[in-house]
Amino acid sequence: MSHIASLDADPDRSAAAGAESDGVARSLFALNLNPADPRRGWRGWLREVGASLDRVLFVQGCQICGGHVDDDPRAAPWCLDCRAELIESVPHCCLRCGQAVGPFASATLKQGCARCRGRSLGFEGVVALGPYQGPIRALCLHLKRASGAWLGAWLMDLTIESRFERLRSLELKTDPDGRPPLVTSIPLHWRRRWARGYNQADDLAARLAQRLDLPWRRVLRRIRPTPKLAGRSPTERLDLMRRAFQVISSRRSCLERRDILLVDDVLTTGATTGAAARVLKRAGAARVFVVVIARTEPNR
């Protein structure tokens, strides 16, 4: 049974209109401020309340161009023109690795593109809002700071809305025991999480699970503090990420024979997500698909 095929995403609906309905069929831009939602917890709820209060008490412009946005605290934090740019900036992408390909390139999920064909990635496919450049890059950089945590829900909502058909094409299945696919996130080492104040991947994963009506769990632990990977070669990144992750022993049973949606903010060379995906599969996961806000271009 596919879990996304029956869901509906209508890009014409908006939270500003105030329309809400039950489950994932409600507006993708309607923030759920129900603190009882166990997948979000009190921290996420308080962040959303704080963001909404900010929108009520202070006039905020578009987070991209500074232009006018709806004063309704539930309205998206970017103007309609910038929202269109975020959605329309996406090139043709390889379904397997997420890299941009030419409009006439043959890039099926099984075969991949010229860059990834024949390579072991660790995961089966990638869903991304767009390339790591321009406004998407700026928003992702802001998201890495605790002060930008409120942007996570909006960015994931936009990713789901604009890439809904891609999500549907994954054909996520229930496992033999009838359990639905599981959403999880790339963890930070505890030192970095303490310094940053939160893990943006957790917030993105929780939002994805909420919108698709899927369970989400933290099932991975980062057991090695790795240096920042920016500027390092793909080989160096792979070496640094070896043995960086471990499945939390009490949650190993959550993974057996299940499809997994592995969430992060940015996918660069795939060293981090590939290492995490391989650990998930060794613990029994059936298939792993990566969901990110941005995918870097080659040689970044």
Image (spheres, rainbow, N blue to C red):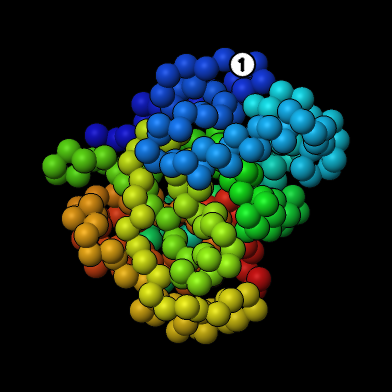
Percent across and percent down for residue 106 are 50, 54
What crowding class fits label 1: few (fewer than 14 Cα within 10 Å), some (14-19), or many (20 or more)?
few
Choose top left, top right, bottom left or bottom right for residue 186: bottom left
Horizontal placement of 2 versus 239: left or right?
Answer: left
Quadrant position of the N terminus in the picture: top left
Q: Number of numbered discs present?
A: 1
Percent across and percent down for residue 14 are 62, 22
x 84%, y 42%: residue:
65
Percent across and percent down for residue 243 are 36, 79
Circle 1 sits in a helix, a strand or a loop, which is it?
loop
Horizontal placement of 60 versus 1: left or right?
Answer: right
Q: Nearer the viewer, residue 16 or 195?
A: 195
x 47%, y 16%: residue:
21
x 50%, y 54%: residue:
201
Choose top left, top right, bottom left or bottom right for residue 170: top left
Residue placed under numbered mark 1 in the picture: 18
Quadrant position of the C terminus in the picture: bottom right
Choose top left, top right, bottom left or bottom right for residue 3: top left
Horizontal placement of 64 versus 8: left or right?
Answer: right
x 55%, y 39%: residue:
46
Percent across and percent down for residue 24 are 44, 27
Q: Is residue 93 visible?
A: no
What residue type is disc 1 on? Answer: Gly
